[in-house]
Amino acid sequence: MLRYFFKRLMFLVPVLFGVSILIFSIVHLAPGDPAEVMLGPAATQEDIANLREQLGLTKPLYVQYGIFLGNALKGDLGRSIKSNAPVMEEIMERFPATLTLALLGMTFAIVVGLPLGILAALKQNTWVDALCSFLALVGFSIPNFWIALMLMLLLSIYIPILPSSGFDSWKNLIMPTIVLGIQTMAVIARMTRSSMLEVIRQDYVRTAKAKGISDRLVLTRHILSNVMIPVVTIAGLYFGHQLGGVVITETVFSIPGLGRLIVDAIRAQDYPVVQGGVLFFAFCVGIVNLLVDLLYAVLDPRIKAQYRAAK
Amino acid sequence: MNSERQSIVTLSAADGKVREKRRSPWWEVWRRLRRNKAALVGMTVVVLLVVVAILAPVLAPYDPNQTNMTQRLKGPSSAHPLGTDNFGRDMLSRVIYGSRISLYVGFVAVGIGAIFGGILGAICGYYGGRLDNFIMRCMDVLLAIPQIILAIAIVGALGTSLLNLMIAVGISQLPRYARVVRASALTVRGQEFVEAAKAVGASDARIIIENILPNCMAPIIVQSTLGVAQAILSAAALSFLGLGIQPPTAEWGSMLSSGRQFLRQAPYLTFFPGLAISIVVLALNIFGDGLRDSLDPKLRQ
């Protein structure tokens, strides 16, 4: 198991390497000179030239990339142009808020989405099913920034019970959690429904029922444990997508997290922060995918057995 | 859809009688689609929206960019059914014109993603081996970055414009088309008609275009329909963040963004553009789902 974990961890290396090349190229192909941005419109040509030299911008691109990669491997992502603080420090300062939001959003998605999907499947082809499925489709289709604004309108303006911005108390977290989790919730509900419908018809479920096991036990032991595997896959895949959603959520609710850091950095043409931030996001997505893979083994004894055999 | 079936149809055309009974694969799809009420509703809404977008100059009661400072922030009334914004512009006209940009961006971005992704996927599936491995690892790299963040980074680099927005959204969608097409190309490449084409001496490019791609159409169409919905959402999100279409252009995402500061006094400024996005995306998703079920029941998850 541990060996498998490290093997999978190694797969992450080429992907992150690729991401570093990609994001480095994107950022450096951008028109606009960071030195000019830093010094503002009042700077003289000479000042700009000096700063370019200082920042290493006069070196060929591949040399610049080499330096960037070498430093990144040591955990140094350069310094922010705007604040002059190390990018890694800025990221780590903002990461807890984003992680909290992401985990809460996922929890919301599972806690609401799973029962919705189960209910729809158990009442297949009734109005309950239609309603659940429609809700899931709506949740998937409504833009999250609009949900954010409508929730704000309802819960901060019309019935002022929740604060519309900030990150101080648990009250600040309710709306962002819903906004961030709603799409994943919809995806989980749909996946749970279709996976349930498939499992319900399996022979082992019929056997279990024939043995006289109570419906409740059949549902929890025989059906749900099998339903969980595809649901975990899709939830894991969506976690990365949902992580992108923090960009919107954090901007709308003024939460000082990673998403807002990147958006602000792009507006300010603060390229080291953009570079480092995107790389860090890719790293998180990779780690999540890895964890999902390991979770399979926990959920599915067949896969666990394979790992053992591989050892 | 299925070239094997098509070839049967042409073969059977020789004896004339059989041909009449066999309908084209597309007719079969349409027959299945017609039975799916929800998909039909979705399709109707999409078609209606396309019509609204085309006829915007006729349908809109005012010029969407005509400011009128005496009519600022007026709530919905008979003169302005959806109210007016902070420059006194008619919201109904702006929402109608907004459909043009959203649909345009959605379709072009998906076009970019589907064409390039499709070609890459077909090459991967057809050649296999190292090239396949290399391209798919590149796709993994693109997939490793959350779509919206990738799009933001690209727009940030290229600068904010309509074209750059479409390119950014298109690129961020590229891997899904590459994967889907690769998967179907893999199943097609071993079939007899591909071997036959090779035997006649057709070039690889010709085989990919004439034999492989037409057989991947079903999944491409399904992915594209759902992809347009995603692209419209992404584009609106980018505009909302100020990184897409810039004001004063009437675009739903940027209208939401400028209406946001008047959330308290004039909530209709954010309500209607958001509702419009939701309706388009919902309709496209419902239609895409139905299309998937009728194009290929096997694709149904």
Image (cartoon, coloured by chain):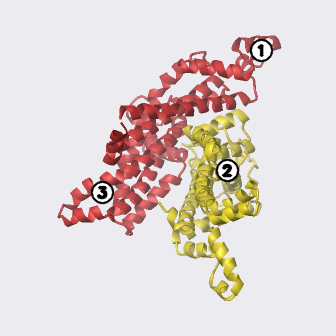
**A306 or B281: which is nearer to us?**
A306
Measuring from the top left, give residue B86's x and y in whole percent: 66, 44
How many residues crowd around disc 1 within 10 Å: few (fewer than 14), some, or many (20 or more)? some
Spatial CA span between label 2 and label 1: 46 Å
Q: Chain of mark 3?
A: A
**Residue at numbered disc 2:** B123
Left-right relation of A249 to A263 = left
Spatial CA span between label 3 and label 2: 41 Å
Measuring from the top left, give residue B171's x and y in whole percent: 66, 44
Left-right relation of B179 to B208 = left
Residue in the image at 67% along x and 47% along y: B170
Residue in the image at 69% along x and 62% along y: B211
Left-right relation of A241 to B218 = left
Chain A appears in which tint? Answer: red
Measuring from the top left, give residue A123's x and y in whole percent: 34, 65
SS for dot 1: helix
